[in-house]
Image (cartoon, helix red, strand yellow):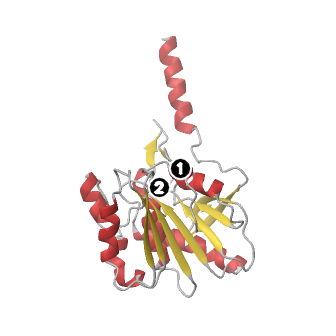
Amino acid sequence: MKKLFVLFTLLILAACAPSEPRIKGFSSETFLANDIQLSGQVKEIKHGEKLRVYIDGNARTTGFFKKRATLDYPVAAKLAQKDKYPYILYLNRPCYFVDDERCTPEAWESGRYLPEIIEEMRQALLQIKMKYRIPEFEFVGYDGGAAIALLLATRIKNMPIKVYTIAGILDTAQYALLTDEKLHPETLNPASEGFSLSNIPQVHLVGAKDKQIPLSLTKDYAKRVPNPVLMQIKSYPSADHFNWANFKIEY
């Protein structure tokens, strides 16, 4: 009985424990968009200066009673930690690490690329743009955060935007087919927005040892963007899907 009680207590603690990655030297912030709070961490945001925005990979569900999003591999957080650029925002997706009764696992599972998810993040970024008169955004998206970054880039108008993806899911439909991932029917797909992305400068970093996002997937995506103003694909020979913090990345 005592062992069962201890196990029960541990399950409760695990369910309630915060799982947001902490970035040394960054301060926690919340951003309101369409009545949903987004959490994030800020190094510094300065009026009139370009802002680099990191978006991490896909979360999974954790917690026995109280289900929450958790990141097993917060690679973008680690990269933001190493980045020497002074003006950085690490922005979580809706329902990541925020308690809200409207948040269900669908927000970070089958519905992770739904239009409303992208719109909520867009609204948060537009508020930051207006408040600080940000002249330019630079997105750095890892894993599923790469798809988010590309979708945001086509929806934020009248300002320069550049996108870097790292081990990125660039074609959500193709990736779902390869992995048997179940996505909502209204899921957005960056690869289907090739013409809109033609005007967005993009740099895609791929690990030669990445078994989840092989170079062929990135090349297939690139073929669907007609006449891009700038698109580069860079392969890192020693990189797999998770060890990107070991490398020096030039932006």
Is 31 drawn above or below residue 58 in the view shown? below
In the rendered view, does 126 fall on the left or right side of 64?
right
Tell me if I can see residue 34 in this picture: no
- Pinpoint residue 137: horizontal percent, then vertical percent: 59, 75
In this rendered view, identify the residue nearer to me: 127 or 41: 41
Q: Look at the numbered disc 1 and give the secondary structure of its residue.
A: loop
Position of residue 9 relative to residue 86, above or below, is above
Question: What is the x, y in percent for residue 210?
Answer: 38, 52
Residue 56 visible in the shown view? yes
Q: Residues within 10 Å of mark 1 (few under 14, many from 20)?
A: some
Residue positioned 50% across, 63% down in the render: 141
Question: Which of disc 2 and disc 1 is earlier in sequence?
Answer: 2
In terms of depth relative to the viewer, which is nearer, 105 or 101?
105
Instruction: Determine whether label 1 and label 2 are within 8 Å by CB.
Output: yes
Residue found 71% across the figure and 61% down from its top: 43
Question: Which residue was labeled with disc 2?
Answer: 57
Q: Residues within 10 Å of mark 2 (few under 14, many from 20)?
A: many
Instruction: Name, please, the residue furthest toward the top.
Output: 1
Rendered image: mark on residue 74: 1
Q: Quadrant of residue 199?
A: bottom left
